[in-house]
Structure formats: C-alpha cells, structure tokens
Amino acid sequence: MLGWVVTFLVIALISGLLGFGGIAGASIEIAKIIFFIAIVLFLVSAVVHVSRGRRV
C-alpha cells in the first residue's frame, strides 16, 4: 500500500511541474487517503498481535 502512496506522490509532483493542477491535487488526495488507510491497518494489526501474546 505504501508503494501506491509513493506512486501517487510521484504522479502529483510530475503533473504539478507540468502545470496540471487538477491531476496533482487529485493524486495528493488519493495518496493521503491510502496513507491513512495503511496507518489504520498497521495499528489494527499491531493491536491484534499484542493482544494475542506469546503462546507456548
């Protein structure tokens, strides 16, 4: 998922440099949404991992 974020950020940078403001803004918004989804999934995964604990 973080690879997608980097991809959309690169698209935003390139389109911003070329003067396509609408595409750059949309790419930044998509990158933000995917980034926050990745953070939430990471936190949920960490909580589940900690709650399970070590079982021998």
Image (cartoon, rainbow, N blue to C red):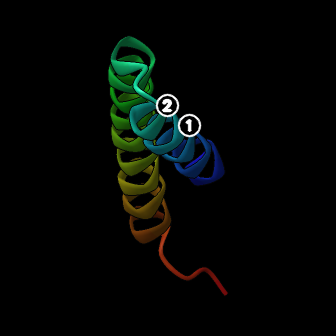
Residue for point 32% across, 22% down: 25
Q: Nearer the viewer, mark 2 or mark 1?
A: 2
Identify the image quadrant of residue 22: top left
Q: Is residue 29 left or right of residue 17?
A: left
Q: Are marks 2 and 1 in contact (CB under 8 Å)?
A: yes
Q: Is residue 24 left or right of residue 54?
A: left
Tell me the quadrant of the picture where the N terminus can be found: top right
Q: Quadrant of residue 33?
A: top left
Q: Which residue is mark 2?
A: 15
Q: Secondary structure at mark 2?
A: helix
Q: Circle 2: is it few (<14), some (14-19), or many (20+) Cα within 10 Å?
A: some
Q: Quadrant of the C terminus?
A: bottom right
Q: Nearer the viewer, residue 15 or 27?
A: 15
Residue depicted at 33% across the width and 35% down the height:
32
Label 1 neighbourhood size at 10 Å, few (<14), some (14-19), many (20+)? some
Q: Residue 13: which quarter of the image?
A: top left
Q: In the image, is residue 15 above or below residue 13?
A: above
Residue 45 vertical placement versus 22 (above, below): below
Secondary element at tag 1: helix
Residue 11 badge: 1
Q: Is residue 40 above or below residue 52?
A: above
Give the number of the disc on residue 20.
none
* x then y, percent, for residue 37: 41, 35
Q: Residue at x 54, y 47 (%)?
A: 10
- The residue most toward the bottom is 56
Which residue sits at x=42%, y=63%? 46
Residue 32 sits above or below residue 50 on the image: above
- Determine the CA span between mark 2 and mark 1: 6 Å
Q: Depth check: 28 or 34 in front? A: 28
The three-letter amino acid code for the residue at tag 2 is: Ser
